Amino acid sequence: MSYQAVSQNFPMWDILERQYIAYKPSDSGDRESLEKYGVQKIIIPIQFATMQAFLTFLMEIFTSMKPVLRVRGADPASIRKARVMETALDYDYRGNRGYFMLQQWFLNACRYGYGVMENTWGTKQTLKKILSPGPSSKMVLEGIEFNVPGAITYDYGWYTIFEGNKWQIIDNRQWFPDPRVSISRFQEGSFCGRRSTIHDNDLFKMEEQGLFFNTSRLAATGWKGSTRDSDIGATDNQRSRNNPMLAFAQELAMAKKARMHVDEMLEIELIPKEYELSEEERPQKWLFNIIDGTSIVRAEPSPFTLYPYSVAEIFPDTLAFMSQGLMELTQPLSTHLDFLFNSHMANVRKAIKDQLLVDPSRVSIEDLLDPDDGKLIRLLPMAYGTDPAAAVKQLAIVDVTRGHSEDAKMIMELWERITGQPSAAFGQVESGRRTALELQGVFRQAGSRMKMIADLISSTGVAPLTEQMAELRKENMTLTQFIEIAGQTAADLGVRPEEIVEGFLALKKDHLDGVFSYPAEEGVLPQDRAGTADYLDGLLDKISKAPFLAQIFDPVAIVRETTRQRGVHNIDDFLNKGIIAQSNIFSPEMINEYLQRKSIEPIPIGGNGAPVGRPDEGVASGREGLSIAGAINGAGRPRDY
């Protein structure tokens, strides 16, 4: 059911993929043109240019603010814990090469209409020699039983190098949601699954971890010998891709050729008692893994609250099963543009290739066919004394494609209106004079339109992905992980100071126990960040000229935010590592006013009759330590010189 609904888009997706990489299969006309002129028909990579400009804008919006994944505390007790959760999710983001994964996710959304990201909890392990304790034993001494630790061994074992959320981009052709609901609401469907390939080694690891079973049957059920399509009933044609059984057989054949297995993971809501899975009579989500369509290697209640997928859509439509993407919207224009260009170039090639009308009784044909430059064409005896122009005449060819260039310009104007991307978005400056205000308005309007699409992606994909990652971290984290906190203090994160070691937090599961919300639409336009930095520069200048404002605003915090808005995120590396204290700037008039009200008192520091050495008052001894006066004037008897 799901495959038949999704596969209706396969032919269009094939066209879009060829347009994106500007690939055109050669035909007989291309081969002839290559032989004669060394060129052939092409696909103008306008789709590629548009997608790259669009992706650049999206990546700037989502990744310019750090951390990329945002978490907010939903109650007063969770505000600081939300900052810890943001730091933990940023660790997962970097561990998954987040920038690359987000770019591919957004690319699929723009190309196919929606992009699918799978998020699960997992570890990355490597086999290496490690020190580990051997099995313990029991010893009874005087009636008391003691547990004796085993001997330390140095042997190969699995060493965990990463534990956290794991991302995987799912091929749209291999993801099968419930078609009875729209993709925007796929979490409300009764089932959701995906198909992929898996190697024997990965099956072994999964069974060793207790996730899979029954994998020993796979060797017996697999095909032996040849894996040609005819041996397993698979066909290789366009029609077979719309038939679920034929399509699966074809994918299985390809997997066998690569010595892989087809892994189908299905999460479905069912009543377990009806299928003799358990005694539960209420609907429950179960997770199944089927290898090569024959062996069930996993069957258990689903560990996920929601389906472990996040879907980003650029033009979501809740009334349709799936919506179109940006490339599908512009595909007809791209096809017309290719036709106009290729037909014009073909006419040009025809025009520059001479077509002559010749009287062979008056002109040497061999001289005309000589390809060398600067050739001499000899006249035959019958042409002696006559006009040579009458023997050879070039045929005039009319360029019927002269207007194609104007038509192409018209298509590009439509392209800009449809996509909302002016030529400036491609990094091109239009000819002609424009005021700075007019140009800024064009940029802002185009940016606002693309910002709306970015907000939709944030609402449909990024925010749900962040929620899934946070829930999996709270439920599955087992190891203590050292996570960089980028200049934040223990007070900022609500943790004990001893849990921070040289700028790294020793993160534990109880640090993440809070109630969180996951905001969407928090991306910032690039021009907004530049404007914000300029505004903060002006604010800092006003504060320096009006000292009373320094009592309200923190100049250091303003400088840090200004620097961050301009794209420098490691400003903490340049901070003075000495003692940093909060200070206020007072004008002389304010100091005199406070002195008259006795709100402040001067501290004697020696000279003009002031005491030197240990003061008589203001010095505490014992556990209390020194007062400010004692710290400034010194403690103890002054030396006699």
Image (tube, helix red, strand yellow):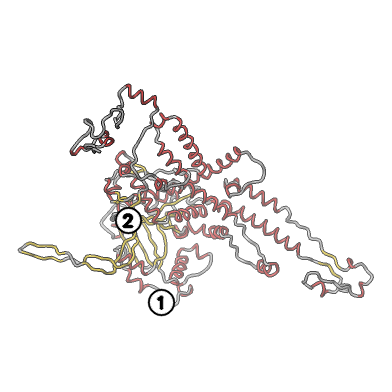
Viewer-side residue, 623 vs 452: 623
Furthest toward the left, the residue is 142
Q: Are marks 2 and 1 in contact (CB under 8 Å)?
A: no
Residue 302: give its label. Answer: 2
Report which residue position mark 1 lands on.
224
Viewer-side residue, 636 vs 631: 636
Furthest toward the top, the residue is 596
* Type of the residue with mark 1: Lys
Residue 462: give its label. Answer: none
Furthest toward the right, the residue is 385
**Residue 1 visible from this viewpoint:** no
Q: Earlier in the sequence, mark 2 or mark 1?
A: 1
Q: Left of 128 or right of it: where is 452? A: right
Determine whether the residue tagged by mark 2 lies in a helix, strand or loop. loop
**Residue 247 visible from this viewpoint:** yes
**Quadrant of the rendering where the N terminus is positioned:** bottom left
Tell me where residue 66 appears, x and y as whole percent. Answer: 42, 47
Mark 2, Cα crowd under 10 Å, few <14 / some 14-19 / many 20+, is: some
Mark 1, Cα crowd under 10 Å, few <14 / some 14-19 / many 20+, is: few
